[in-house]
Each structure stands twice: as C-alpha cells, then as structure tokens.
C-alpha cells in the first residue's frame, strides 16, 4: 500500500495509509471530501514534509472534483484551499504543493490532477537522488565502511511517496553493504521513530535498535554513532532547518563529539523566501499528546504542557544539507 495515492473511485478520492494505526494495523483511509483531508493531515494520518506536498497538490484536485460535481462558488473553493494550505504551518511542502497546482485551477480538475501526479512521481525520483548523493557524501567524509546511523522521527517511504529522505540514504547505504546498525530515536510524543521508522527498517531487513529520545546524547557520547541523518520540514536560505522536536538536542550533542549531523530534504523543502530559521513558524500541538500515551492518561489531570512539534537547528550544527540537486555544506557558510 502506498503512503498516498489517487483513485477515480467515487468521482475522485485520495487513499492514505493511516499512519496513526501503524505498526499494529495497516489500514487505508479513503478521502472524498476536502475537510476530511484537512483533518487527516492534522491528525497525522499523513505526515512528513514531502508526503504533505503531494497531499497539498492532490487536495486541490479533490477540491475541484467536489466543486465540479456540486457547483461550488469561487469563494467556497478559495476557503477550502485556504484551509488545506494552512492545515499545518511548519512543513513548507504543504503550501508549496498547493501553490504548484494553483495556476492550473482555471483549467479544471483534470489538469490539476495531472500536475499533482507529476509532483508525486518527481518525489519518488528525488528521494532516489538524495539517497545517492547522501550516501556518496558519507563515503567521502567517513570512508567506505559500515556505518552506525542515528535517526530522528520518520523520514522513510511513509514520509514521502517512496524510499524516503534520510531513510532513503540509509536504504542506499544498506544496498551498498554499508550499514552496521541504525539507532532510531523513538520520537516522543507521537512515536514516529518507534512506530514508523522501526516498521520500515524491519521490513527492509536493516538492523536497528530503538532508543528513548533521552538516550540519544548518551549514545553519541558513548561512541555508538558515526553519523546523524535527519529530514526537514522547512530550510531557510542560510541552512537553518526545522525538523521534529528533539532534532536540535541531537545536533548539539553530535557537534560536541564531532559526529557529522546531516539534513536530507528535497529542494521543495527549501524556503528561499526566508533568510534564517527565526522566520519559521513552529506548530504547537495539544496537551493530550504529552499527558496521555495511546489515549491513556499518564500525567495528573489538569497538567499544562509545552508541546512544540518542531525545533530549528542552526546551520552551524549542520555539516551538510543534502537535497535532490546538491550537497550544501552549510556549516562552512554555504547558503542555499
Ligand atoms: O509531525 P511530523 O511527523 O509530520 O514531522 C515530520 C518530520 O519532522 C520529518 O522528519 C520531516 O517532515 C522530514 S520527512 C522526510
């Protein structure tokens, strides 16, 4: 089952692999109404920056299919597009995906759909390219040897259309016989590492261990890691990169012990309208994600929380940003 796909069934629908149910259950979510897609994005049924880009583009096609069937006003179409574009604020790919197809709206749903499907196909190609560039760069700086990689959040096929960004590099290294082990941060509070990354690594036959986020610094200081590979949700021109909360702490620790910290993301994640990470809007999420585990209350009722979904790692901690076009050595002052 693919992360996200289009079907002509029901007059046009988006099919999602429901990531809230993984790894215990593999379930498909069939979306026929734009509001359902917004909810699915906000609940993280679909997530990960590149996958959200595809969801944004396909979502506009879905809006137009609904509109053509029901004769919506221009104002209603615009409201639905606004809701989709702003469903989550940090990953630039969502708004990017919407903007990529917007110029085609006047030509109708089929033109928009065609372009959205091209974006999805391009994402798969980009992931392979990032995998190759990232693996080549690691071999260049660390030598042609088996590596122990630390990852954070989920950056695999589930976060893209296939293969993945940081996990795409891991897949590429594995295909070259260069992976000794992946240490996957569990990634509190929603456990994208232990639920999703571990599921993907297991299916790919790549040796892995899951560690609590609080153990990442210890693993780095204990010499268990050769390189850290993460994805990104938005990258500023100077290389500052927003990614899942906890990435910043890993970056600081990696720098303390001289372990290269790499960000792997497609060009569509680079927001060249912003100079630095200070301009990145960070999504804050609800208390329940912190005070409960899998729906079971674990903190005292009424506890308040601090729950930013992302943090920004300054470029000085990032050895390189690897996109589908090139390797930018941002800590050496190279800008994107
Ligand atoms: O809240 P999420 O699960 O959407 O956060 C996702 C991440 O932070 C990923 O690391 C990022 O989108 C890169 S995915 C290739």
Image (tube, grey):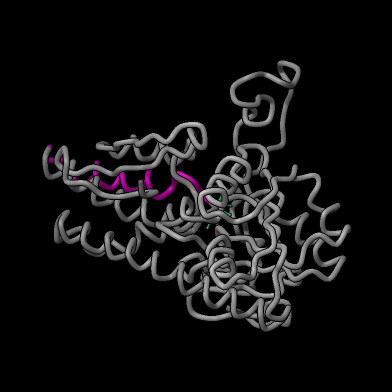
Which of the two residues, 307 or 166, is positioned nearer the viewer here? Answer: 166
- Quarter of the view holding residue 250: bottom right
Left or right of residue 265, residue 310 in this image = right
Left or right of residue 304, residue 206 in this image = left
Q: Position of residue 171 (x, y in %)?
A: 54, 64
How many numbered circles does the render carry?
A: 0
Q: Is residue 93 visible?
A: yes
Q: Position of residue 249 (x, y in %)?
A: 78, 54
Q: In which quadrant will I find the C terminus?
A: bottom right
Specify the segment rendered in magenta: 70-89
Magenta region includes residue 126: no
Q: What kind of secondary structure does the magenta stretch mostly adopt?
A: helix
Q: Position of residue 92 (x, y in %)?
A: 49, 58
| Residue at figure coordinates x 78%, y 62% from the top left | 225
Q: Position of residue 160 (x, y in %)?
A: 45, 56
Left or right of residue 69, residue 151 in this image = right
| Residue at figure coordinates x 79%, y 51% from the top left | 216
Residue 128 sits above or below residue 290 on the image? below
Which of the two residues, 24 or 284, is positioned nearer the viewer here? Answer: 24
| Residue at figure coordinates x 69%, y 58% from the top left | 181
Which of the two residues, 303 or 79, is positioned nearer the viewer here? Answer: 303
Q: Is residue 94 visible?
A: no
Residue 6 sits above or below residue 136 on the image? above
| Residue at figure coordinates x 39%, y 39% from the top left | 38
């Amino acid at each position: 089952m693919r992360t996200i796909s289009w079907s002509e069934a029901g007059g046009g629908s988006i099919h999602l692999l429901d990531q809230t149910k993984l790894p215990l259950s593999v379930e498909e979510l069939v979306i026929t109404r734009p509001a359902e897609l917004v909810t699915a994005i906000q609940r993280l049924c679909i997530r990960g920056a590149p996958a959200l880009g595809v969801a944004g583009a396909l979502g506009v096609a879905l809006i137009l299919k609904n509109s053509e069937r029901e004769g919506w006003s221009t104002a209603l179409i615009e409201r639905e597009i606004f809701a989709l574009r702003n469903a989550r604020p940090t990953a630039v790919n969502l708004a990017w995906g919407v903007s990529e197809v917007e110029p085609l709206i006047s030509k109708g749903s089929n033109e928009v759909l065609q372009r959205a499907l091209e974006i999805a196909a391009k994402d798969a190609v980009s992931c392979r390219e990032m995998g190759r560039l990232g693996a080549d760069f690691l071999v260049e700086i660390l030598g042609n040897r088996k590596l122990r990689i630390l990852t954070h959040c989920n950056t695999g096929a589930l976060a893209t259309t296939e293969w993945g960004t940081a996990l795409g590099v891991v897949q590429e290294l594995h295909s070259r016989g260069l992976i000794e082990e992946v240490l996957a941060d569990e990634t509190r509070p929603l456990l994208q590492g232990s639920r999703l990354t571990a599921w993907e690594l297991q299916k790919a036959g790549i040796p892995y261990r899951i560690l609590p986020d609080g153990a990442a610094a210890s693993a780095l200081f204990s010499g268990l890691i050769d390189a850290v590979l993460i994805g990104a949700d938005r990258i500023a021109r100077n290389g500052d990169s927003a990614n899942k909360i906890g990435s910043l702490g890993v970056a600081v620790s990696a720098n303390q012990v001289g372990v290269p910290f790499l960000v792997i993301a497609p060009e569509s994640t680079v927001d060249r309208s912003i100079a630095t990470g200070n301009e990145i809007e960070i999504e804050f999420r609800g208390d329940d994600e912190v005070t409960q585990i899998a729906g079971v209350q674990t903190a005292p009722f009424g506890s308040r929380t601090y729950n930013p979904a992302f943090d920004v790692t300054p470029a000085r901690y990032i050895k390189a940003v690897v996109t589908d076009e090139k390797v930018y050595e941002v800590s050496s002052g190279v800008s994107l």
